[in-house]
């Protein structure tokens, strides 16, 4: 039996591969500190869970329109209008079973096979995987590691645009670096998009998790609302990863295409979860803010502790819940070839699960800087214990190898 080539172009997501191995190790009795998965360790706020249960009991368990329950689309339109400073109508909103489905729909609807899509590298792995699956080309735009943190190489971005380019993908606050683009950088990207008539897919799933500076959506810049595909969801801000609830905000013509896509892909998002989404957006926000403040405290703790590890150098992330330390020197000191080997050694020898840079479409090379992603969606005790284990691992490896700190 033959399989479609497009299916074989989809890439497995490394985080879930590591999650499987960690689960097997834990089941075998190993004590593992998990810094590998991007999932809040908080519970969904009670008012949201109550709204979902009430919706089930009210028999809101049948089909909804493919683009979503009208009241939910209105709540999203109000929320985006208020937080992004743009005018959004409910007709521009399309609900999806998770932000990833909205991303899939955007790329399928706006990018032809053979076209080029520019995206940041390191990258959330779904972007290059979906682009590759439809037969298009993912063109990496690298970050520059500066003394002030990570910055997207905008000169490189501008130089990579060709007549074959059709879309720029943005993801800020960024997974995995935690960086946030300033308004002036967004303005330059907007100029490039307008000059070359490009779509911009703006993944804003971490927009509620900003700690330093202000979040700015590129959709709010002049002449960008029509060409921006804004995607967002409830997984991160409200600890609703398993609810699979996201949305896209697009121009009305594109919204009609999205509606048809959703009708064919999954008929509709679960109706009762959409009513829970209404409660999330319109109900009390103090639990979501409490989560953000706890993430802020954890961020400060994990960066402090990582910078105490021999060979580690870690910037302070501005948003999301990821740290992305440079471990080039740590690999050298520990006698390891690259971040992939460090990832495996930390799991097997120290009981700490992290993700290597190669999990984010950022290939290793003998002369390249090496990085790992640390998710601080874990409690303070786990952060302290996990970073202690990493520090002890490095001290032990340095001692065995005879290398000097």
Image: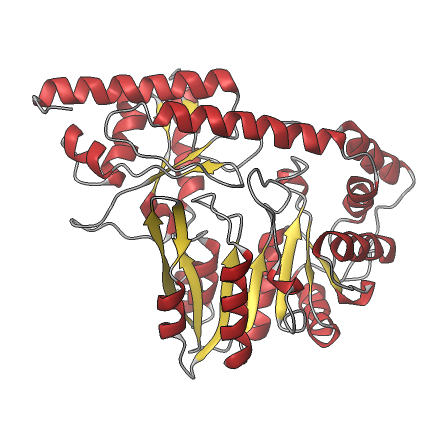
Judge whether 25 appears above or below 193 on screen. above
**In-front residue for pair 218/248:** 218
Residue at 47% from the left image edge and 37% from the top image edge: 322
- Does 295 sit above or below residue 77? above
Quadrant for the C terminus in the image: top left
Residue extending farthest to the left is 402
Task: Return the residue nearer the eye: 244 or 80.
Answer: 80
What x and y, as percent, mark residue 142?
35, 58
Foreground: 315 or 356?
A: 315
Total of numbered circles in the picture?
0
Quadrant of image for the N terminus: bottom left
Q: Residue at x 65, y 35 (%)?
A: 239
Classify residue 40 as left or right of residue 84.
Answer: left
Q: Return the residue found at the far bottom.
A: 163
Q: Position of residue 182 (x, y in %)?
A: 52, 54
Name above or below for residue 137 compared with residue 130: below
Give the residue drawn at x 60%, y 40%: 209
Question: Does residue 211 appear in the picture of this structure?
Answer: yes
Q: Position of residue 10 (x, y in %)?
A: 43, 59
- Horizontally, residue 311 falls left or right of residue 280, namely left
Decide which of 358, 260 is in the foreground and name it. 358
Residue 92 picture quarter? bottom right
Q: Position of residue 135 (x, y in %)?
A: 43, 72
């Amino acid at each position: 039996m033959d399989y479609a080539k497009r299916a074989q172009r989809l890439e497995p997501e490394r985080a879930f591969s590591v999650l499987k191995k960690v689960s097997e190790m834990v089941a075998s009795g190993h004590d593992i500190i998990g810094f590998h998965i991007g999932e809040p360790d908080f519970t969904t706020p009670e008012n949201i869970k109550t709204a979902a249960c009430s919706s089930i009991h009210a028999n809101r368990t049948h089909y909804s329109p493919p683009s979503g329950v009208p009241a939910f689309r209105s709540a999203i339109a109000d929320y985006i209008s208020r937080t992004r400073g743009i005018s959004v109508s409910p007709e521009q909103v399309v609900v999806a079973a998770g932000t990833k489905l909205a991303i899939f729909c955007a790329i399928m609807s706006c990018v032809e096979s053979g076209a080029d899509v520019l995206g940041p590298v390191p990258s959330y792995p779904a972007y290059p995987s979906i682009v590759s699956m439809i037969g298009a080309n993912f063109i990496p735009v690298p970050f520059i590691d500066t003394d002030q943190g990570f910055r997207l190489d905008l000169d490189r971005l501008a130089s990579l645009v060709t007549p074959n380019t059709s879309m720029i993908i943005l993801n800020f606050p960024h997974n995995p670096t935690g960086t946030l683009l300033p308004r002036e950088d967004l303005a330059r990207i907007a100029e490039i998009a307008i000059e070359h008539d490009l779509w911009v897919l703006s993944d804003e799933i971490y927009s509620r998790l900003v700690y330093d500076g202000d979040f700015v959506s590129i959709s709010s810049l002049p002449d960008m609302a029509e060409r921006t595909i804004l995607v967002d969801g409830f997984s991160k801000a409200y600890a609703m990863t398993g609810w699979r609830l996201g949305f896209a905000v697009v121009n009305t013509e594109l919204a009609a295409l999205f509606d048809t896509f959703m009708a064919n892909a999954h008929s509709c998002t679960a109706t009762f979860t959409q009513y829970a989404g209404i409660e999330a957006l319109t109900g009390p926000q103090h639990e979501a803010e409490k989560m953000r403040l706890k993430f802020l405290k954890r961020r400060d703790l994990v960066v402090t502790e990582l910078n105490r590890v021999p060979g580690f150098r870690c910037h302070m992330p501005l948003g999301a819940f990821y740290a992305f330390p440079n471990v080039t020197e740590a690999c050298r000191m520990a006698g390891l070839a690259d971040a992939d080997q460090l990832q495996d050694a930390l799991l097997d020898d120290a009981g700490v699960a992290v993700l290597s840079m190669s999990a984010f479409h950022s290939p290793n090379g003998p002369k390249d800087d090496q990085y790992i992603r640390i998710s601080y969606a874990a409690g303070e005790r786990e952060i302290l214990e996990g970073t202690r284990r990493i520090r002890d691992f490095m001290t032990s490896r340095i001692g065995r190898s005879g290398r000097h700190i």
